[in-house]
Amino acid sequence: METFQYTITDEVGLHARPAGLLVKQAKQMGSVITLQAKGKSADAKKIIAVMALGVKRGETVTVSLEGPQEQEEKEELSRFFAENL
């Protein structure tokens, strides 16, 4: 299992547009991807679950990846977060 933390910088947090981008990216990966924030967790491949976390700008999420290519996908997802969220 690989994990990393990221502090959301997008003005609206993980709302519809950024959450949609994240889900689209996560669905392209083979790993099981879980987001954790504010004591809750969500499957990163389900938009309603991601939005239900209610993550706002300045809040930190912990991203966990588990799968055969988790290390490579962690690097790719870390770049995605930095560029889009």
Image (cartoon, rainbow, N blue to C red):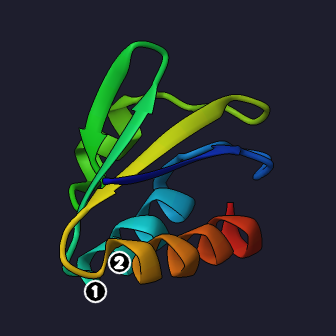
Q: Residue at x 66, y 76 (%)?
A: 79
Q: Are marks 1 and 2 in contact (CB under 8 Å)?
A: yes
User: Could you say where residue 10 lies in the image, as x and y percent from the top left?
Assistant: 76, 52
Callout 2, which amino acid?
Lys
Please name the residue that numbered disc 2 is placed on. Answer: 24
Judge from the rendering whether residue 18 lies leftward or rightward of residue 40; answer left or right: right
Question: Which of the two discs, 1 and 2, sits closer to the camera?
Answer: 1
Disc number for residue 53? none
Say which of 12 and 44 sits in front.
Answer: 44
Please say if 58 is above or below 20.
above
Q: Residue at x 27, y 38 (%)?
A: 42
User: Could you say where residue 37 lies in the image, as x and y percent from the top left?
Assistant: 48, 26
Say which of 54 and 2 sits in front.
Answer: 2
Please say if 2 is above or below 63.
below
Label 1 Cα crowd, 10 Å radius (few <14 / some 14-19 / many 20+): few
Q: Secondary structure at mark 2?
A: helix
Say which of 30 and 46 sits in front.
Answer: 30
Please say if 52 is above or below 77.
above
Callout 1, which amino acid?
Gln
Judge from the rendering whether residue 29 lies leftward or rightward of residue 8; answer left or right: left
Please name the residue that numbered disc 1 is placed on. Answer: 28
Image quadrant where one finds the C terminus: bottom right
Total count of labels:
2
